[in-house]
Image (cartoon, helix red, strand yellow):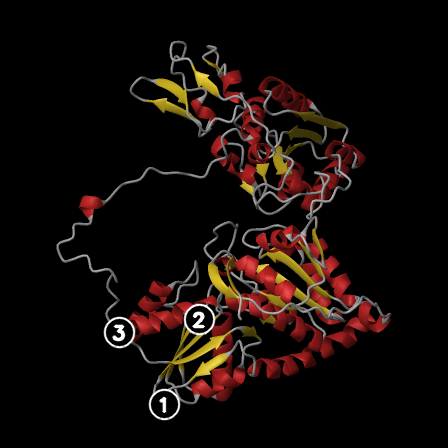
Amino acid sequence: MSTREYMLGNVAIARGIVEGGGQVISGYPGTPSSEIIGTLAAMQERNFYVEWSVNEKVALEVAAGAAMAGVRSVVTMKHVGLNVAADPLMTLAYTGVKGSMVIIVADDPSCHSSQNEQDTRRYSQFSLIPCLDPADPQEAKDMMSYAFEFSNKFQIPVIFRPTTRISHGKSDILLGPVNEDMPAADFQKDLGRWVMIPKNARVRHPHLLDLQKDMLAEFEDSPWNSLEMHEGVKLGVIASGLASVYAKEALAKMGIDACFLKIGTYPIPEGKIRSMMEQVDTILVFEEMEPVVEEQVRIIAQQLAIPTTIIGKLQGPVPRIFELNVDVCADVLAEVLELEKTANPVDIGEDFDYNACRIDLPMRPPVMCPGCSHRGTFHAMKKAFGKDAIFPSDIGCYTLGIQSGTVDTTLCMGGSITVASGMYQAGEKKPICCSIGDSTFFHTGMNGLLNAIYNKADITVTIVDNRITAMTGHQPNPGMGRTATGEETSEVDIAALCRSLGAEFVETVDPYDLEQTEEVFKRARGFNGTSVVITEQLCVIDAKRSGIRRKPFIVDSEKCTGCKACVRLGCPAIEFDVGTKKASINSMCTGCAVCSHLCKFDAISGVKK
């Protein structure tokens, strides 16, 4: 009897890794990919190794080493993480692998939790490494076993590209058997293959190019590419990955008959595209983000001298930004075929008054959690450095310090220290104080700090250490003393590490103690050279999970003068009544006590019980 389970897409992918016999799985947390490693690490019984690596480059190299030794490996990251791992990726295409290696890179159309909409398929084109593009969570699970087999057959890594709606969507998943036939590690020396000096690289590059023809032939008959032709129909629709689901539903919704090609692999199946071109007059291409498929379709049409009209993103009307959905696809079809756009599917009657039920909601910008220690850090930082100082920041929860006026730049993981250094070296005279989280510091911040110290940058580096990788789901990092699977390990002392890199001013402070934190920041500002301030306090969510409970605070309305000093802190637990002109504290209070330190009228105190 078939077994089904209702699963998150990333959980289904993790199941696919298990079914495919994955043996070494590494990764760095990044939404929307994080739950894959988290799911595997939480399994009580496992015959595979799993780790959170310190960054994506390291994670890819760990997985590459395992695959070179002949086993099945997987590395996970989000799309911007592949930028960090691009250096080994490009050369790994030349060396290939001995076992199997799958590189899972989760793209994020519409920037739900990312700084850009980068399309990983471009890396597939750039590196000449094949890519699989699942259309739904079931296909994502099933594709994993295929990816292992394909990688092993052609001795090359395979990029696996889920998007946010695949990773974070939920579906009823049909489970398959688990592959128990796992190869043993047995690295075989082969200097001409594994050592990429120029002489060897010049040989491996033609091999990689020759491999493209064999892989393309394999993908022509792949189950992930399917062509539906209808006699006499002159409209063809080509859609890739998740967009194929949207396009198919839009066609059904509008009652349009079209030849349909679903693409799930790169290189794309050129033979199937040629077959469609021989019959249709117009081809409409749906794909999320970049016009990768469309460009290839246009090249094929040009090579064959076929005057097929090709419509997609390059000249519109398919949007090149943000996510696609059924309605977007339907509207594009209506525009191309000169049809009326579909009406609201819910019949609400001709006399329905939209304005009568319209609600103008207040703006709700994202804010740090009630009691977040970063709030105290930023308050003290701004007090010590002044509002005219420059505050480069980084990727993490603390990026929300933008609400506190202490985030002036955010470029990429680890970029805060190096951007700050560049500003100083450019001759900037205003004081510079950058901020970076503990996990991000381990990721790529250490190199930046070493560079700042070595090149004598007069800046202050603030490491906001909340003892966890909070933004992506509370994964462990090297400063916590435990691995992805919960095993105890060495706990990196950030202060000692900074001193070993050459920092002469290194101070650790509790950001809940505003007076002391401000005093340390003032001394750091006055230090000539690269100073480091470490603000250390448990993430408030992780503290709750650990059983730490602090007594909440209340406002004495008799003493409150309505000065709003506590309100300006920006804590969601603090409210202000415009009628009484008094502040109050709601049930979200976590007892951090920062607001009580701010009140000059002694109006805020902890509850007695």
| Residue furthest out toward the left | 351
The structure residue drawn at horizontal position 48% and vertical position 12%, both measured from the top left corner, is 600
In this view, the mark in front (1 or 3): 1
Tag 1–tag 3 contact (CB < 8 Å) = no
Q: Residue flagged by tag 1: what amino acid is it?
A: Glu
Q: Circle 3 sits in a helix, a strand or a loop, which is it?
A: loop
Give the x, y percent position of residue 185.
81, 66
Q: Which residue is mark 3?
A: 338
Mark 1 → mark 2, Cα distance in angstroms: 21 Å
Neighbor class of circle 2 (other Cα within 10 Å; few <14, some 14-19, many 20+) is: many
Figure check: 543 above or below 170: above
The structure residue drawn at horizontal position 62% and vertical position 40%, both measured from the top left corner, is 416
Question: In terms of depth relative to the viewer, which is nearer, 173 or 594?
Answer: 173
Q: Residue flagged by tag 2: what amino acid is it?
A: Ser
The structure residue drawn at horizontal position 21% and vertical position 45%, both measured from the top left corner, is 357
Figure check: 52 above or below 229: above
The structure residue drawn at horizontal position 63% and vertical position 66%, both measured from the top left corner, is 19
Q: Circle 1 sits in a helix, a strand or a loop, which is it?
A: loop
**Nearest to N terminus: mark 1 or mark 2:** 1
Q: Circle 2 sits in a helix, a strand or a loop, which is it?
A: helix
Q: Which residue is mark 2?
A: 244
Quadrant position of residue 543? top right
Q: Which residue is mark 1?
A: 231
3 on left or right of 447? left
Mark 2 → mark 3, Cα distance in angstroms: 22 Å
